Image (tube, rainbow, N blue to C red):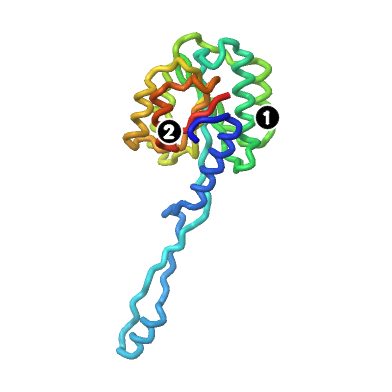
């Protein structure tokens, strides 16, 4: 199911990310062991030469460090009330770090309005993030009132990944219905340029643009949830 309630889908989102991380083989963490096959040893001993060696690669289960990015549309499309926007974002942050599939990843927050502004990264469970969630709930999140262009979020994530050679574990975007460049965002996934697991959360089930809905229905890399 590509569309559903955010709290249920976030839990499944992190479960899938963690499962994929544990099962995927990361070559830079593999252990290579050179062994002598018993049959090779016997044959070599009988014919007076050194036995050929066989290299076996043991895939590692080591977690590769990464972070979760929470991107927030501050155009006012989530809500034109800054207190309500703060409450919604605070609840989603709290749900994120309270997920039973959460593995204490760092959290970076990107605010997208007339420009991009970053907060963090925060450690997932310490008091620092608790204080931040409390602050945005009490003070709200200021909105710009302009129609949002969310494409810079994806471009920034790709730019940082290219520079650091490290992908984030996942991207969660909180937005409303009026956004620009939705089809360009879809094209990033279709072209394979953007492969980071993504969830976009909308205020209502019917808020998501049709282009994103259609792609989400056929590709689990991008999922849509509603508040």
Image point (40%, 17%), residue name:
180
Image point (69%, 32%), residue name:
127
Report the number of discs.
2
Residue 146 in view of the camera: yes
Work out whether 166 lies above or below 157: below
Q: Secondary structure at mark 1?
A: helix
The residue singled out by tag 2 in the image is 217
Q: Secondary structure at mark 2?
A: helix
Q: Which of the 4 quarters of the picture holds residue 48?
A: bottom left
Q: Alpha-carbon neighbours of circle 2 within 10 Å: few (<14), some, or many (≥20)?
A: some
| Quadrant for the C terminus in the image | top right
Give the distance between the C-alpha atoms of the residues marked 2 and 1, in whole angstroms.
35 Å
The foreground one among 78 and 42 is 78
The foreground one among 163 and 124 is 124
Q: Position of residue 210 (x, y in %)?
A: 41, 23
Q: Alpha-carbon neighbours of circle 1 within 10 Å: few (<14), some, or many (≥20)?
A: some
Dot 2 and dot 1 residues touching (CB under 8 Å): no
Residue 163 in view of the camera: no
The residue lying furthest to the bottom in this view is 46
Residue 214: numbered disc: none
Q: Position of residue 25 (x, y in %)?
A: 44, 54
Q: Which of the 4 quarters of the picture holds residue 185?
A: top left
The residue lying furthest to the top in this view is 145
The residue singled out by tag 1 in the image is 130
- Give the mark nearest the N terminus, 2 or 1: 1
The foreground one among 103 and 163 is 103
Q: Position of residue 60 (x, y in %)?
A: 49, 57
Task: Select label 2 or label 1 by which is in front.
Answer: 2
Q: Position of residue 137 (x, y in %)?
A: 66, 19
């Amino acid at each position: 199911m590509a569309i559903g309630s955010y709290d249920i889908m976030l839990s499944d989102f992190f479960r899938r990310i963690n499962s994929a991380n544990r099962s995927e083989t990361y070559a830079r963490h593999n252990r290579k062991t050179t062994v002598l096959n018993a049959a090779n040893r016997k044959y070599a001993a009988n014919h007076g030469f050194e036995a050929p060696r066989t290299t076996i690669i043991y895939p590692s289960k080591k977690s590769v460090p990464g972070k979760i990015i929470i991107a927030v549309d501050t155009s006012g499309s989530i809500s034109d009330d800054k207190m309500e926007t703060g409450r919604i974002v605070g609840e989603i942050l709290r749900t994120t770090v309270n997920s039973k599939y959460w593995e204490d990843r760092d959290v970076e927050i990107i605010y997208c309005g007339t420009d991009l502004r970053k907060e963090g990264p925060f450690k997932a469970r310490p008091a620092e993030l608790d204080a931040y969630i409390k602050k945005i709930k009490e003070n709200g999140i200021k909105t710009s009132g302009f129609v949002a262009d969310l494409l810079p979020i994806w471009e920034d994530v790709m730019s940082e990944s290219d520079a650091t050679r490290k992908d984030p574990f996942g991207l969660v975007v909180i937005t409303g219905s009026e956004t620009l460049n939705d089809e360009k965002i879809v094209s990033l996934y279709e072209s394979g340029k953007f492969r980071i697991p993504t969830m976009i959360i909308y205020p209502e089930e019917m808020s998501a643009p049709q282009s994103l809905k259609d792609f989400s229905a056929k590709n689990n890399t991008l999922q849509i949830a509603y508040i």
